[in-house]
Image (spheres, rainbow, N blue to C red):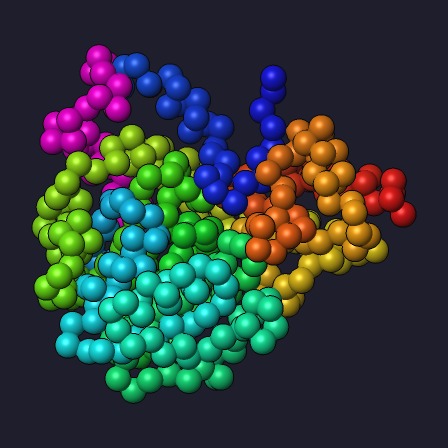
Amino acid sequence: MSRVYNFSAGPAVLPEEVLKQAGEEILNWHSSGMSVMEMSHRGKEFKEIAAQAESDLRQLMKVPENYVILFLQGGATGQFAAVPMNLLREKKKADYVLTGNWSKKAISEAKKYCDVNIVASNEDANLTYVPSFNKWDLSNDAAYIHYTSNETIGGVEFSWVPETGDVPLVCDMSSNILSRPIDISKFGVIYAGAQKNIGQAGLTIAIVRDDLAGDALPYTPAILNYKLQADAKSMYNTPPTYAIYIAGLTFQWIKKQGGIEAIEKKNIRKAEMLYSLIDASDLYHSPVANDSRSRMNVPFTVKKAGLDEQFLVEAKNNGLVQLKGHRSVGGMRASIYNAMPEKGVAKLCEFMKNFEKGHA
């Protein structure tokens, strides 16, 4: 069977080139006689893989020297707890922006450790827009400000970075990291699960300004302590070695594409192709405000009742899979991360046009 176009929100499509290289190297990495899965994380071979992955990521994202890059486990969900435990220090309050299901979960976890001030929310419009910064009700004593740059479920994405002055800005960037250039120096902490734009599930990346790696709350588990992990070069415990290897291959693939700047241009073309079709259609509808639409996750509905299941079945028959919307939202969702080729989005658009003709 030929490969399908996989629009899953995560674990998501990987670059075919990465999969092929991993397949070629799975039994014998660089004449070592071993699979990466079998290597000691303390051995020369894996240390080389990890160092190269970190170097490539630092180069791609232009990470300044005063930031540490951590290869962790526990997903973004683990970081929901790690952030307050590492950043609260002597303070009792943190500011959070609520824009969807994932920011809600981050807020719920943070409430276990501090007072959470929700500075802005889009719940008044069913989680479909990014609240304007001039309407944020910021605290004067917050330890940090947290937001989710792209809500995978609702398809709401920030196209801008909040200016928070001396208050550390923290971002869950799980579903749009590496999709557009960002200025790392504006952030205190960035974290991201790998299974969208970085690689396979099981790896979490945290980029932490070095002055924020220290003075964690005394009950912080060692595995979530930024300073301990930084001092141990992400090897306080056995890291997710194969996931780091796959991430490294993905970083090299992005570099071959021309870097994040070139990737962004492709992402813009893919998103515009799909949104243009939806906007011009009498059958499909996008619930997200135009200026808040995600380039990575495109939710849409079919206006005629009873057609969702037929849409999904016919899409699958055309080699287009994982298009069902999240159970909390319904409808459809096309996740078009970095590794989704433009021809995959073009095929989806062609199918959607034909489906509409058949159900006019």
The image shows residue 321, relative to residue 116, as above or below, that is above
Horizontal side of 39 relative to 242 (left or right) equals left
At x 59% / y 38%, what residue is drawn? 322
Instruction: Determine the residue located farthest toward the right in the rendered image.
Output: 360
In the picture, residue 81 is in which quadrant?
A: bottom left
**At 56% across and 58% down in the image, what residue appears?**
154
- Whole-percent x, y for residue 247 in the image: 34, 37
Q: From the viewer's perspective, is residue 145 above or below residue 22?
A: below
Q: How many labels does the image show?
A: 0
Most distant residue in the bottom direction = 140
The verdict on residue 42 being magenta is: yes
**What residue is at 29 percent from the left and 87 percent from the top?**
140
Q: Which residue is drawn at 57% across and 50% down?
A: 326
Depth check: give the residue in front, 127 or 296. 127
Q: For the N terminus, which image quadrant?
A: top right
From this view, report whether residue 244 is shown above or below residue 356: above
Instruction: Please tell me which residue lies in front, 304 or 162.
Output: 304
Percent of width and height locating residue 204: 31, 46
Q: Which of 173 and 60 is in front in this view?
A: 173
Instruction: State left or right for residue 144 relative to residue 342.
Output: left
Residue 311 x %, y %: 74, 40
The span picked out in magenta is 31-58
- Quarter of the image where one finds residue 110: bottom left
Residue 193, above or below 186: above
Q: Does the magenta stretch include residue 13?
A: no
Q: Is the magenta stretch mostly helix, strand or loop?
A: helix
181 relative to 94 in the view: left or right: right
Q: Nearer the viewer, residue 179 or 328?
A: 328
Residue 353 seen by the camera:
no
Question: Residue 294 sits in which quadrant?
Answer: bottom right
